[in-house]
Amino acid sequence: MSLESDLKTFWESYQPVLQLVETASGATDIPELRQKMDLLQPTLITLPFWEIHYDHPQKWYDSLVLSEINLPCTGATNSLSLKPKYQEADDKVSWNSAERQQVSERDVSTDHYWDFSLYFKPEIKPKWKSAGERYAHDVVKLKSSVGEISASTEDGSGSFISVERGKFLAEEEAKPRIIVGEDGWPRERELLPARIIKVRLGYKTIEQGLSDEEMGKQMTQMYEGYTYVTSIQFRISDLGAGEVDRFLQHLGVKY
């Protein structure tokens, strides 16, 4: 079963809901919104055992804007929680996603490149392999047959690159960095972004009030692999490319 395929199917069925929210004039439309939503609710395509949750029950868009979808993983204790992004302004709701509409005010988020966050409950604790001497002590890697995660324990972020994507990037980086533009002037060739999926990490909680020696031991443990994957972020337009499915395979998560 493909998580990407299921999410794409649901997202396509959710488009009328987004359009309804985006075109509503505000809280004065509550009765009409309720009536329209009653008609749209049966059209949402969800799979058995999916749980849909809506955010801010006291707001006028209650049961309109999706907060998260919980997806149980078969054969594992993990459940996945999908959260799309939206924002509030002047009693209106805007869908903060570049895939919905190319409007400048939608790019208010510093993280607008990513439309969705997929949270793991409980967090996944992978076995990190040595990063090698060329990497700093706070950088860890997790390799598998489908790709690798390269992440820093300093800022809690990382990236996943599938095997196919890794080969593509190697070919891109091997090309000349300086090219001649249509105007005849040399310029630096634009490199395609290497990060398909952004990985968010968590850390083992460091206890307070410890001696310097005990604190040092806990810090060493954190660097030795006590970090865990809390969530990933991706663009809705990437669904179907296989990256999200490969990432789950990479972590050993069965959907």
Image (cartoon, rainbow, N blue to C red):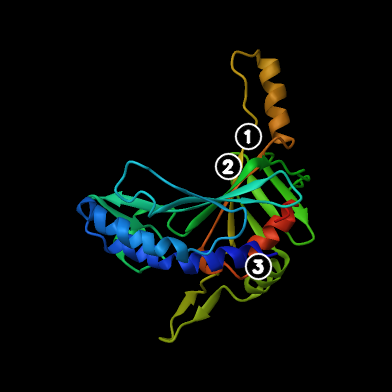
> Reading the chain from its start, which is encountered first: label 2 or label 3?
2
Residue 242, labelled with which disc? Answer: 3
At 51% from the left and 68% from the top, the residue drawn is 237
Query: Badge 3: how crowded within 10 Å, few (<14), some, or many (20+)?
Result: some
- The residue that label 2 is drawn on is 156
Please determine whether, in this image, residue 182 is positioned above or below residue 125: below
x and y percentages locating residue 37 in the rendered image:
36, 59
At 67% from the left and 65% from the top, the residue drawn is 2
Amino acid type at mark 2: Gly
Classify the position of the C terminus by image quarter. Answer: bottom right
Classify residue 131 as left or right of residue 179. Answer: right
- The residue that label 1 is drawn on is 203
Query: Badge 2: how crowded within 10 Å, few (<14), some, or many (20+)?
Result: some
At 66% from the left and 20% from the top, the residue drawn is 215
Classify residue 164 as left or right of residue 55. Answer: right
Amino acid type at mark 1: Tyr
> Reading the chain from its start, which is encountered first: label 1 or label 2?
2
Q: Nearer the viewer, mark 1 or mark 3?
A: 3
